[in-house]
Protein backbone atom coordinates (compact mmCIF):
# COMPACT_ATOMS: atom_id res chain seq x y z
CA UNK A 1 0.00 0.00 0.00
CA UNK A 2 1.19 3.51 -0.78
CA UNK A 3 1.89 5.84 2.14
CA UNK A 4 -1.14 8.02 2.76
CA UNK A 5 -0.67 11.37 1.05
CA UNK A 6 -0.12 14.31 3.34
CA UNK A 7 -1.92 17.56 2.66
CA UNK A 8 1.02 19.55 4.02
CA UNK A 9 4.06 17.96 2.36
CA UNK A 10 3.07 18.66 -1.25
CA UNK A 11 3.17 15.02 -2.32
CA UNK A 12 0.15 14.03 -4.37
CA UNK A 13 -1.08 10.87 -6.06
CA UNK A 14 -1.27 10.80 -9.86
CA UNK A 15 -3.34 8.04 -11.42
CA UNK A 16 -2.02 7.91 -14.98
CA UNK A 17 -3.65 6.36 -18.04
CA UNK A 18 -1.53 4.34 -20.48
CA UNK A 19 -2.90 3.98 -24.04
CA UNK A 20 -2.61 7.28 -25.94
CA UNK A 21 -1.37 9.02 -22.81
CA UNK A 22 2.00 7.32 -22.36
CA UNK A 23 2.28 5.56 -25.71
CA UNK A 24 0.57 5.56 -29.09
CA UNK A 25 -2.23 3.04 -29.42
CA UNK A 26 -5.33 4.04 -31.35
CA UNK A 27 -3.41 5.12 -34.45
CA UNK A 28 -2.59 1.45 -35.09
CA UNK A 29 -6.24 0.47 -34.78
CA UNK A 30 -7.16 3.25 -37.20
CA UNK A 31 -4.71 1.87 -39.75
CA UNK A 32 -6.16 -1.61 -39.35
CA UNK A 33 -9.67 -0.22 -39.81
CA UNK A 34 -8.64 1.64 -42.96
CA UNK A 35 -7.17 -1.58 -44.39
CA UNK A 36 -10.34 -3.50 -43.50
CA UNK A 37 -12.63 -0.92 -45.14
CA UNK A 38 -10.45 -0.93 -48.25
CA UNK A 39 -10.59 -4.74 -48.33
CA UNK A 40 -14.36 -4.75 -47.90
CA UNK A 41 -14.66 -2.28 -50.82
CA UNK A 42 -18.39 -1.93 -50.30
CA UNK A 43 -20.32 -0.81 -53.39
CA UNK A 44 -23.29 0.72 -51.55
CA UNK A 45 -21.88 2.03 -48.29
CA UNK A 46 -19.30 4.79 -48.23
CA UNK A 47 -16.19 4.33 -46.05
CA UNK A 48 -17.75 6.66 -43.47
CA UNK A 49 -20.94 4.60 -43.43
CA UNK A 50 -18.97 1.37 -43.02
CA UNK A 51 -17.10 2.98 -40.14
CA UNK A 52 -20.37 3.90 -38.47
CA UNK A 53 -21.53 0.29 -38.66
CA UNK A 54 -18.21 -0.80 -37.17
CA UNK A 55 -18.60 1.73 -34.34
CA UNK A 56 -22.01 0.29 -33.52
CA UNK A 57 -20.67 -3.27 -33.62
CA UNK A 58 -17.76 -2.32 -31.36
CA UNK A 59 -20.17 -0.89 -28.78
CA UNK A 60 -21.95 -4.24 -28.79
CA UNK A 61 -18.70 -6.22 -28.64
CA UNK A 62 -17.45 -4.33 -25.60
CA UNK A 63 -20.42 -5.63 -23.60
CA UNK A 64 -19.68 -9.27 -24.38
CA UNK A 65 -15.96 -9.31 -25.18
CA UNK A 66 -14.54 -6.32 -23.33
CA UNK A 67 -11.60 -4.41 -24.81
CA UNK A 68 -8.50 -5.56 -26.64
CA UNK A 69 -7.50 -7.26 -29.86
CA UNK A 70 -9.85 -10.23 -29.46
CA UNK A 71 -12.83 -7.91 -29.18
CA UNK A 72 -11.58 -5.78 -32.08
CA UNK A 73 -11.10 -8.80 -34.35
CA UNK A 74 -14.60 -10.00 -33.42
CA UNK A 75 -16.00 -6.58 -34.35
CA UNK A 76 -14.34 -6.62 -37.77
CA UNK A 77 -15.75 -10.07 -38.51
CA UNK A 78 -19.25 -9.10 -37.35
CA UNK A 79 -19.12 -5.95 -39.49
CA UNK A 80 -18.13 -8.01 -42.53
CA UNK A 81 -21.02 -10.38 -41.86
CA UNK A 82 -23.49 -7.49 -41.69
CA UNK A 83 -22.33 -5.73 -44.82
CA UNK A 84 -20.79 -8.23 -47.23
CA UNK A 85 -22.80 -9.99 -49.91
CA UNK A 86 -20.48 -13.00 -50.02
CA UNK A 87 -20.50 -15.52 -47.18
CA UNK A 88 -17.78 -15.51 -44.54
CA UNK A 89 -15.40 -18.36 -45.35
CA UNK A 90 -12.60 -19.57 -43.05
CA UNK A 91 -10.09 -17.93 -45.40
CA UNK A 92 -11.90 -14.59 -45.28
CA UNK A 93 -12.16 -14.78 -41.51
CA UNK A 94 -8.42 -15.41 -41.26
CA UNK A 95 -7.73 -12.43 -43.50
CA UNK A 96 -9.95 -10.17 -41.42
CA UNK A 97 -8.33 -11.35 -38.19
CA UNK A 98 -5.02 -10.51 -39.82
CA UNK A 99 -5.98 -6.85 -40.02
CA UNK A 100 -6.50 -6.82 -36.26
CA UNK A 101 -3.51 -8.83 -35.18
CA UNK A 102 -0.98 -6.92 -37.30
CA UNK A 103 -1.24 -4.38 -34.45
CA UNK A 104 0.81 -6.74 -32.27
CA UNK A 105 3.79 -6.40 -34.62
CA UNK A 106 4.19 -2.67 -34.08
CA UNK A 107 6.96 -1.63 -31.69
CA UNK A 108 5.99 0.46 -28.69
CA UNK A 109 5.96 4.14 -29.61
CA UNK A 110 6.36 6.14 -26.41
CA UNK A 111 4.87 9.61 -26.65
CA UNK A 112 7.37 12.44 -26.68
CA UNK A 113 8.86 13.48 -23.31
CA UNK A 114 6.97 10.81 -21.36
CA UNK A 115 9.96 9.02 -19.75
CA UNK A 116 11.61 12.27 -18.70
CA UNK A 117 8.36 13.62 -17.31
CA UNK A 118 7.61 10.42 -15.40
CA UNK A 119 11.10 10.52 -13.88
CA UNK A 120 10.45 14.10 -12.77
CA UNK A 121 7.03 13.26 -11.32
CA UNK A 122 7.90 10.04 -9.52
CA UNK A 123 10.59 11.84 -7.52
CA UNK A 124 7.94 14.20 -6.17
CA UNK A 125 4.66 12.30 -6.04
CA UNK A 126 3.08 8.83 -5.90
CA UNK A 127 2.31 7.45 -9.36
CA UNK A 128 -0.19 4.66 -10.07
CA UNK A 129 -0.69 3.39 -13.62
CA UNK A 130 -4.40 2.83 -14.28
CA UNK A 131 -5.22 1.22 -17.61
CA UNK A 132 -8.20 -0.70 -18.94
CA UNK A 133 -8.37 -3.59 -21.35
CA UNK A 134 -7.48 -7.26 -21.66
CA UNK A 135 -5.17 -7.99 -18.73
CA UNK A 136 -2.51 -9.97 -20.61
CA UNK A 137 -2.36 -7.45 -23.46
CA UNK A 138 -2.05 -4.45 -21.18
CA UNK A 139 0.48 -6.16 -18.92
CA UNK A 140 2.61 -7.04 -21.96
CA UNK A 141 2.53 -3.46 -23.21
CA UNK A 142 3.53 -2.15 -19.80
CA UNK A 143 6.51 -4.52 -19.72
CA UNK A 144 7.59 -3.63 -23.26
CA UNK A 145 7.23 0.09 -22.64
CA UNK A 146 10.07 0.22 -20.13
CA UNK A 147 8.02 2.63 -18.00
CA UNK A 148 7.00 0.26 -15.21
CA UNK A 149 9.79 1.44 -12.90
CA UNK A 150 8.23 4.88 -12.53
CA UNK A 151 5.05 3.60 -10.88
CA UNK A 152 4.48 2.62 -7.27
CA UNK A 153 1.54 0.43 -8.33
CA UNK A 154 -0.28 -0.76 -11.46
CA UNK A 155 -4.00 -1.32 -11.88
CA UNK A 156 -5.36 -3.07 -14.99
CA UNK A 157 -9.14 -2.88 -14.97
CA UNK A 158 -11.91 -4.13 -17.25
CA UNK A 159 -13.61 -0.73 -17.32
CA UNK A 160 -13.03 2.76 -15.95
CA UNK A 161 -16.04 4.20 -14.20
CA UNK A 162 -16.84 6.05 -11.00
CA UNK A 163 -16.94 2.87 -8.92
CA UNK A 164 -13.49 1.81 -10.14
CA UNK A 165 -11.98 5.12 -9.09
CA UNK A 166 -13.68 5.00 -5.71
CA UNK A 167 -12.34 1.48 -5.29
CA UNK A 168 -8.78 2.58 -6.05
CA UNK A 169 -9.08 5.43 -3.55
CA UNK A 170 -10.22 2.95 -0.90
CA UNK A 171 -7.65 0.29 -1.77
CA UNK A 172 -4.69 2.65 -1.46
CA UNK A 173 -6.18 4.87 1.27
CA UNK A 174 -5.81 7.94 -0.93
CA UNK A 175 -6.84 11.46 -0.05
CA UNK A 176 -9.21 12.67 -2.78
CA UNK A 177 -8.12 16.30 -2.42
CA UNK A 178 -4.62 15.46 -3.61
CA UNK A 179 -5.40 12.64 -6.04
CA UNK A 180 -5.50 13.31 -9.79
CA UNK A 181 -6.48 11.17 -12.78
CA UNK A 182 -4.32 12.00 -15.80
CA UNK A 183 -5.45 10.88 -19.24
CA UNK A 184 -6.65 11.57 -22.76
CA UNK A 185 -10.17 10.14 -22.60
CA UNK A 186 -13.04 12.31 -21.33
CA UNK A 187 -15.26 9.21 -21.12
CA UNK A 188 -12.92 6.94 -19.16
CA UNK A 189 -10.29 9.12 -17.53
CA UNK A 190 -11.71 12.54 -16.81
CA UNK A 191 -15.46 12.47 -16.24
CA UNK A 192 -15.74 9.37 -14.02
CA UNK A 193 -12.77 10.51 -11.91
CA UNK A 194 -14.42 13.88 -11.34
CA UNK A 195 -17.69 12.11 -10.50
CA UNK A 196 -15.78 10.08 -7.90
CA UNK A 197 -14.65 13.31 -6.23
CA UNK A 198 -11.09 13.25 -7.57
CA UNK A 199 -9.22 15.87 -9.54
CA UNK A 200 -8.31 15.34 -13.19
CA UNK A 201 -5.79 16.42 -15.79
CA UNK A 202 -6.97 16.22 -19.40
CA UNK A 203 -4.16 15.57 -21.89
CA UNK A 204 -5.85 15.74 -25.33
CA UNK A 205 -4.67 13.36 -28.04
CA UNK A 206 -5.45 13.81 -31.72
CA UNK A 207 -6.17 10.10 -32.23
CA UNK A 208 -8.33 9.30 -29.22
CA UNK A 209 -10.68 6.39 -30.04
CA UNK A 210 -14.06 7.69 -31.17
CA UNK A 211 -15.87 5.59 -28.55
CA UNK A 212 -13.91 7.46 -25.87
CA UNK A 213 -15.08 10.86 -27.09
CA UNK A 214 -17.29 12.87 -24.75
CA UNK A 215 -17.72 16.39 -23.49
CA UNK A 216 -15.46 17.12 -20.55
CA UNK A 217 -17.70 17.88 -17.59
CA UNK A 218 -17.23 20.84 -15.31
CA UNK A 219 -15.79 19.75 -11.96
CA UNK A 220 -17.89 20.20 -8.85
CA UNK A 221 -16.07 21.76 -5.92
CA UNK A 222 -13.75 20.71 -4.37
CA UNK A 223 -12.66 18.70 -7.44
CA UNK A 224 -10.36 20.49 -9.86
CA UNK A 225 -9.70 20.10 -13.59
CA UNK A 226 -6.52 21.04 -15.45
CA UNK A 227 -6.16 20.91 -19.24
CA UNK A 228 -2.60 20.68 -20.56
CA UNK A 229 -1.24 20.79 -24.09
CA UNK A 230 0.95 17.71 -23.73
CA UNK A 231 2.32 15.28 -21.16
CA UNK A 232 5.46 17.29 -20.54
CA UNK A 233 3.30 20.20 -19.35
CA UNK A 234 2.50 18.22 -16.20
CA UNK A 235 5.80 19.55 -14.87
CA UNK A 236 4.25 23.01 -14.73
CA UNK A 237 1.58 21.82 -12.28
CA UNK A 238 3.20 19.07 -10.22
Image (cartoon, helix red, strand yellow):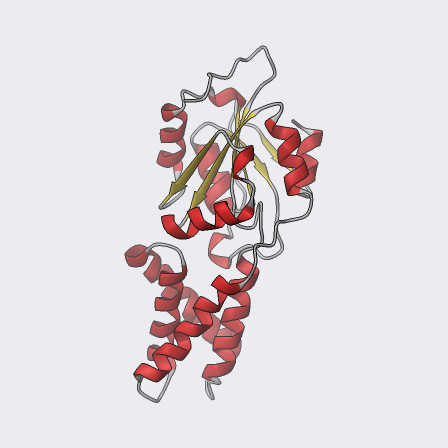
Residue at 51% of width from left, 20% of height from top? 177
Residue 165's spot in the image, x, y percent? Answer: 41, 33
In the picture, measured across the screen, residue 120 lies left or right of residue 218, that is right
Residue at 40% of width from left, 57% of height from top? 68
Q: Nearer the viewer, residue 116 or 7?
A: 116
In the picture, measured across the screen, residue 63 lies left or right of residue 5, that is left
Residue 41's spot in the image, x, y percent? Answer: 49, 85
Q: Nearer the viewer, residue 144 or 64?
A: 144
Residue at 37% of width from left, 60% of height from top? 59
Q: Nearer the viewer, residue 95 or 183?
A: 95
Quarter where residue 117 is shown: top right
When the figure is inspected, residue 134 is found, relative to residue 182, above or below; the finding is below
When the figure is inspected, residue 233 is found, relative to residue 56, above or below; the finding is above
- Quadrant holding the N terminus: top left
Q: Of all residues shown, which one is farthest toward the top? A: 8
Residue 191's spot in the image, x, y percent? Answer: 48, 39
Residue at 37% of width from left, 84% of height from top? 84
Quarter where residue 218 is shown: top right
In the picture, measured across the screen, residue 193 lies left or right of residue 117, that is left
When the figure is inspected, residue 71 is found, relative to residue 168, above or below; the finding is below
Residue 115's spot in the image, x, y percent? Answer: 64, 40
- Quadrant holding the C terminus: top right
Amino acid sequence: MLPRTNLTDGRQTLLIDADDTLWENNVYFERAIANFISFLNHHEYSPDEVRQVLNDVERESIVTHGYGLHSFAHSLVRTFERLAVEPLTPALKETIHGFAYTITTHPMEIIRDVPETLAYLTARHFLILVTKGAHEEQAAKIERSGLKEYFAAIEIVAEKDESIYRGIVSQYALTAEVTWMVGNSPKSDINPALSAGLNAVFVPHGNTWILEHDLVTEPQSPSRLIVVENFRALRNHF
